[in-house]
Image (cartoon, rainbow, N blue to C red):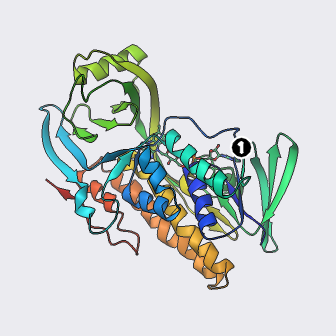
Amino acid sequence: MKPIIVVGAGPVGLTTALALDFYGLPFVLCEEDAELSRDTKAGTVLTRTLEAFRRYGVADRVLAKSLRVDEIGDIERATNTARASVQTEVLSEDTRFPFVINMPQHHLEPILQQALEERRPGALRLRHRLVSFDAADNRVTARFETPDGAREVEGPYLLACDGGRSTVRSQLGVPVEGHSDDARVLLVDVKVDLDVANPRDYPYLSYFADPQEWMILVRHPHCWRFLYPLAPDAPEPSEAEFKKKVLGFIGEVDQLEILNTIVYRIHHRIATEWRRDRVFLMGDAAHLITPMWALGLNTGILDAINLPWRLAWVARGWAADSLLDGYAREQRPVAAEGSGETERGGEGDDRRRLGQRDDPHHAGRSPRRR
Ligand SMILES: Cc1cc2nc3c(=O)[nH]c(=O)nc-3n(C[C@H](O)[C@H](O)[C@H](O)COP(=O)(O)OP(=O)(O)OC[C@H]3O[C@@H](n4cnc5c(N)ncnc54)[C@H](O)[C@@H]3O)c2cc1C
């Protein structure tokens, strides 16, 4: 069998590659950049993603570099009173990972990359930019731009994990349905000690409700992350303004360093078609949904759980091609539901998604709130 062509080495492409390795399928993973992204993106990994990492043999290394969270705070910002909190231990009987972890995406991806290099040396091809492809006669031919010139790769399937601006999706002419919010999100990563030197007693993942300005606090292994809304017409704050905002919340501290700031928009957009013959859309290429409640990266990993085993079953002759249609049939509603739910602005019930009850093998219960 020729290698399955996976395009894009973000978290979804990397996890998909590990899954294909797990099922013993040949593949190449082609990434346009010379190295993995170092951008500030996702920060929380949910239970179901951890289960996938365990199946694909990387959970231990991921856990070793992350910060475990057993309680998710829900706090009224104005009065600083806890309204409720999600106790993830309620999932204890349903999963071996009854918690979530905080870890920046740019720390997670190299762990997946390293595992892949160990298991399939050379399968990850950096500086391979997909420029075009054809699907015909039971195979896909993909053309890449590389430092050594144009290169053609042939394979039985093309898995597009090439992100929100997917070349594959646009060349297929598949539209995305939905909208983007006018309001934006401000994210600031801060190096500060809020544990010992300046103790602040909040769960390491806390949502602060407020009619004026909500806030999310995420403790990462190397920093604290603050997220705030930014009104549609408001100018982007300067670094000094970011700092003032953070200090306004935590009060005086002995030392504080701004590591990184970013302003981004939230989308609720889903591709109308996820499979065209031998080409599949996965991750952000298929759904650009809100990162709130960690649904961006984690929804993509659900795609990487759903499709590879189907490809393996068909390759082994255990199932007909129609098994592959189940991928979009199951995953599209998951993405649509995630996107739609969060449009309601973070109502408390959205946190039930932590249980990821969509997986038929995992009848997750909702975390208890108190
Ligand atoms: C600021 C920010 C904060 C976020 N916070 C969260 C969060 O808290 N929780 C959460 O779950 N999600 C969050 N997300 C969303 C999350 O980062 C994405 O959902 C996730 O990166 C999607 O992974 P992916 O692998 O599908 O795509 P990507 O990570 O975009 O990876 C796509 C890869 O494909 C490569 N590529 C693109 N085109 C080509 C081509 N033609 N040829 C070869 N390679 C190509 C790219 O270089 C890239 O490496 C956040 C995103 C942002 C921007």
263 or 248: nearer the viewer: 248
Which quarter of the rendered image does ligand 1 occupy? top right
Residue 176 seen in the figure: no
Is residue 249 found left or right of 328 in the rendered image?
Answer: left
Q: Which residue is mark 1?
A: 32
Is residue 221 found left or right of 217 in the rendered image?
Answer: right
- Quarter of the image with the N terminus is bottom right
Please report the residue visible at 40 percent of the width from the left and 28 percent of the height from the top: 189
The amino acid on which the numbered mark 1 sits, given as a three-letter code, is: Glu
330 or 156: nearer the viewer: 156
Label 1: state its secondary structure. Answer: loop
Q: Is mark 1 within 8 Å of ligand 1?
A: yes
Please report the residue visible at 41 percent of the width from the left and 54 percent of the height from the top: 339
Q: Position of residue 68 (x, y in %)?
A: 33, 47
107 or 363: nearer the viewer: 107
State whether residue 302 is above or below residue 76.
below
Q: Position of residue 145 (x, y in %)?
A: 81, 45
Rendered image quadrant of residue 26: bottom right
Q: Position of residue 103 (x, y in %)?
A: 42, 42
